[in-house]
Amino acid sequence: MPASALSDRAARAALSAHFTPDQVAADLAQHSPAEVWEQRVRRDNTGRLSHLQPEAELSNAQLSCRFLIPTDPQWPAALADLGPACPLGLWVRGHDHLPQLTTSTIAVTGNRAPSPETLARAREFAGAISEAGHTVAASLAYGVDAAAQEAALLNGPTLAVLPRGLDQAHPHNHAPLLRSITSDGGAAVSLYRPGTVASGATLKASAHLLVALARAVILIEALDHSQALRTAEAAIALKRPLLAVPSDGSLHSGGNAHLLDEGLALPCPTPSHALLLL
């Protein structure tokens, strides 16, 4: 398909499926998305890209979710903070709610296998934050993230950031939670088109997306070298305020202790402290 016949939306969707934003950022600064796609097709010695049909593939994918691009009115302006890593587009379920949800978004995250006490703490923080009018954002991951979203849903809509295509939940048995989020005024977003499965790379990129969409990040509990700690590190890199619940001395909260000892996070022992800091 000639570049002139390819829409910006379809071209961006095709580029985002095969390249990271930083790989095409320089070209997009000088050429249209359709022209950049055609350039990449010509340079592809494998011939793999030439067999793709971006418009048809986009139309099929949008049967389950919407592909937003930066010129759409619902596009979150905060994503510009990612610089060259700013997404080429964003797959969204509940896109009409996205502008309101991202006005005052607070990410809540933590360990995937927390203690019952930690789960209770996550629910307490998320409930207070959502009751105060903020949007709680998290992944659908087991543990702290899912508990935070479940608690926030009792007060209003929430935002889920998934490390896979929005055709399924991750993990799969959190599909009812995903349906509750998107059917009750909330939204789910992903960097990945339907059919994409989760991987280490998608988890890392999704952590950065979650942080970019948020005004601040609250770390309930994190192991060293955990996904939750990577989210906290993304907050530091993007200069988002990072609030951490003080460590209880257990190994499960070693990540919090490290961040607080290094002065990289603000201590946040209770939801009331969080609301004051926010």
Image (tube, rainbow, N blue to C red):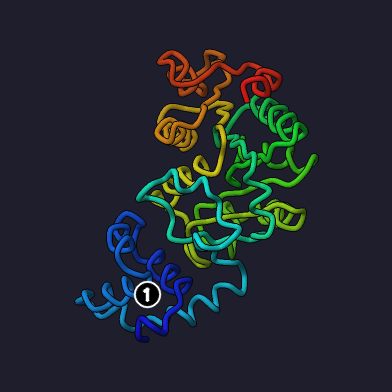
Q: Amino acid at mark 1?
A: Ala
Badge 1 density bin: few <14, some 14–19, many ≥20, Cα 10 Å: many
In the image, 83 versus 61, the foreground residue is: 83
| Image height of 173 relative to 238, above or below | below
| Image height of 30 relative to 53, above or below | above
Q: In the image, what residue occupies the spot 58% across and 72% down? A: 62
The residue that disc 1 covers is 34
In this picture, residue 9 sits left or right of residue 122 = left
Which residue sits furthest right? Answer: 154
Q: Residue 106 appears at what percent x and percent y?
A: 61, 36
Q: Residue 10 appears at what percent x and percent y?
A: 46, 74
Which residue sits furthest front? Answer: 30
Q: Residue 237 appears at what percent x and percent y?
A: 39, 33
| Image height of 107 relative to 159, above or below | above
Q: Quadrant of the C terminus?
A: top right
Q: Quadrant of the N terminus?
A: bottom left
Q: Which quarter of the figure has residue 40?
A: bottom left
Q: In the image, what residue occupies the spot 48% across and 48% down? A: 79
Q: Which quarter of the figure has residue 3?
A: bottom left
Q: How many marks?
A: 1
Q: In the image, what residue occupies the spot 46% across and 38% down? A: 227
Q: Residue 66 appears at what percent x and percent y?
A: 59, 67
Q: Which quarter of the figure has residue 272?
A: top right
In this picture, residue 242 sits left or right of residue 42 = right
Q: Secondary structure at mark 1?
A: helix
| Image height of 139 relative to 117, above or below | below
